[in-house]
Image: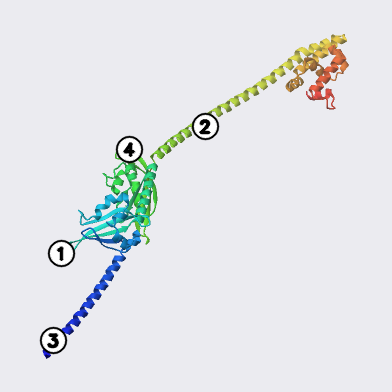
Amino acid sequence: MRRKMIMKDKTKEQLIRELTELRREYTEIQESKQQLQAVLDYTPNVEHWVGPDGKLIWVSSLVSEVTGYSVEECFQMKDFPLPMIHEADRKRRKHLFTGAGQESRGHHFDFRIICKDGREKWVSLSWRTMYDKNGINLGWRYSISDITDKKQLVNELNKTNHILGLAQEVSEAGIWTMDIQTGKVTWSNALYRLFGLSPSKDKVSRETWRQLFHPEDRERTERIFNDSLNRKISRRTTYRIVLPSGEIRWILSRGNTVFDEAGKPLFMVGICIDITEQKKLEEELKKHRNSLEMLVKDRTSELERKTLQLEETITTMRFLLDQRQKDRQEIQENIMANVNQLIVPFIDKLKINCSDRTNASYLDLLENNLQNIVSPFSNRLAYKNLNFTPSELQVSNLIREGKSTKEIADILNLSISTIQFHRDNIRKKLDLNKKNQKLSIFLRSLS
């Protein structure tokens, strides 16, 4: 009996220990379940488990945040998540959820879904087949991540790349980058075209670039590039390249160094622009400028030569004018000498032997006219171009000699009124009508 009691007490203690162990294990299981549930609930992606029969076994609560559908609505949905997939993507993505003929895993299959509120989102699907420890298929675990923002960024990036590519094509330019740590060089497609290479056939490196440099520019260009790389500064340079076809092109290149937040250089980025046409225009402009300078120089020389010729001509003309004036003066002096020596003496003899008053007057008139012809007075009147008539010239000469109107009339055998008419015309032509000046005095002032 006592032995039975001892065995009963031991069984009781053993049961207590077993119960205590079960409670501990149960508590650990609950804690592990809670931790696992927390991991599943707060995973950044929508997770769900589909059994071998294709039925939904479990879905994470994040599904409501991403799609707007509750967990219960997802379980009620036939062939979850096919009904919420965009109609345009549903057919080509349906096989991913049937389980039939699937591979053991798959990653990053993108498609669109329609949320409960009608919004459209882009998601990316990955999956993996699950097995128990005995290798029995437990179904498939799916992970769906919201990539809407990423898609928008990709679309914006594609748009920017398209614009950049168009800008490079229009401007005949290309972009390059170089990782400073690894030395890896990357070219845009436009730069491949610019340098006459193919993105699919030609592998680029600094040596590729170096070989393209024109032999006469290679050393200078490498020195500038290395200086920019070593000093981590921006540099701008122009150089020539020789394309595989043998064609020579002019390139304008500019590069910048990009640094991280700590100031460590990460990579260099630059642009190459084809300026061959600009260089051709500059060369043409230089030729035109040189031609213009030569033309100006030739014209200047021609002008200087003609100026010298003109100065020589002017000097010659001055000499000839001076000589003409001397000849003229000499002729006048000869005429005056001849008149005084060959004519005047005979007039004086005629005056002595002439008793007739009228003839004596004619002799005086003849002498006066001869003197007027050779005197500066007659030259002065002709120079002033007063358009005196021969009669006005005779009358003016006699007035200058102090003859009265009556004496002039007797000498010229004209009426007094005619002589007065000539006097009035002479005053008018000499602009003396409004001046209180004696005509004889004014005429003598001209000699």
Q: Which residue is mark 4?
A: 247
CA gap, disc 2 and disc 3: 139 Å
Crowding at dot 4, Cα within 10 Å, few <14 / some 14-19 / many 20+, comes out as few
Q: Amino acid at mark 1?
A: Asn
Mark 4: secondary structure: loop
Number of the front mark, 1 or 4? 1
Tell me whether circle 2 and circle 1 mark residues in contact (CB < 8 Å).
no
Viewer can see residue 44: no
Q: Which residue is mark 2?
A: 300
Q: Which residue is mark 1?
A: 134
- Give how far across and how far down residue 231 sits, in percent: 37, 55
Mark 1: secondary structure: loop
Quarter where residue 232 is shown? bottom left
Mark 2: secondary structure: helix
Mark found first going from the N terminus, 2 or 1: 1
- Mark sitting on residue 65: none
Mark found first going from the N terminus, 1 or 4: 1
CA gap, disc 1 and disc 4: 70 Å
Mark found first going from the N terminus, 4 or 3: 3
Mark 3: secondary structure: helix
Q: Amino acid at mark 3?
A: Met
Mark found first going from the N terminus, 2 or 4: 4
Number of the front mark, 2 or 4? 4
Q: Is residue 179 left or right of residue 404?
A: left
- Give how far across and how far down residue 25 sits, in percent: 22, 75
